[in-house]
Amino acid sequence: MSGLEIERKFLVKKGDTFKRVAFSDSHIRQGYIPADGATVRVRTRDDSAWLTIKSHAGDDGLTRYEFEKEITQEEAAELLKLCKGGVIDKRRYLVSCGDHVFEVDEFFGDNSGLVMAEVELRDADEPFEKPDFIGREVTGDRRFYNSNLLTHPYRLWCDDLEADDGLENEK
């Protein structure tokens, strides 16, 4: 699969509402292979694995080119050894809302306490309905990029977030 990726990211409000309304959940481990001019990600999701290459996001953080190919678990295991900085460990919940599906990621390890949701859109101006658990938008905030969370884990800067009542991501 390849094409333009358009997504918006949000912090998630406190509570486990997203877990109760999810129609699916899966365990994800992913790492990043060093590359200039692109992000190269290796991801396992339950029993499947993918290699993904993404261009850097534009200034708005909303769109970027993405190429993705399914690989074997064995290939993923070997490629994960090449990843710099370890792996991101998270559980992803899928939640339907209106015509869209929100991917809600609950992070573990050094990023424990961080819960984010993202929705993919067909057009940057496409309207969408937000579930009640959606909090502050963080689209384009590089601190919340998975690749950045490896080198600058959430636990190191979570106290710096502005106070925003009801967010899961506060300590």
Image (tube, grey):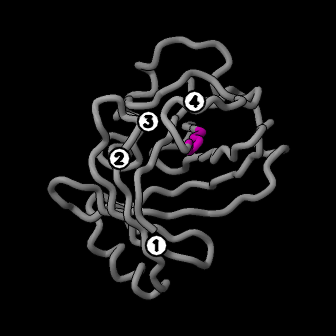
Secondary structure under the numbered disc 4 in the rendered image: strand
Residue 50: which disc?
A: 1
> From which residue to which does the magenta span run?
117-121
Q: Residue at x 21, y 61 (%)?
A: 34
Q: Residue at x 33, y 44 (%)?
A: 148
Q: Main secondary structure of the magenta part?
A: strand
Q: Position of residue 135 (x, y in %)?
A: 63, 23
Q: Position of residue 97 (x, y in %)?
A: 77, 39
Of badges 2 and 1, nearer the viewer stands 2
Of badges 4 and 3, nearer the viewer stands 4
Closer to the N terminus: mark 2 or mark 4?
Answer: 4
Residue 11: which disc?
A: 4
Residue 64: which disc?
A: 2
Q: Residues within 10 Å of mark 4 (few under 14, many from 20)?
A: many
Q: Give the residue pinned by disc 3.
A: 155
Q: Is 118 one of the magenta-colored residues?
A: yes
Q: Amino acid at mark 2?
A: Arg
Which residue is most to the right? 20
Secondary structure under the numbered disc 1 in the rendered image: strand
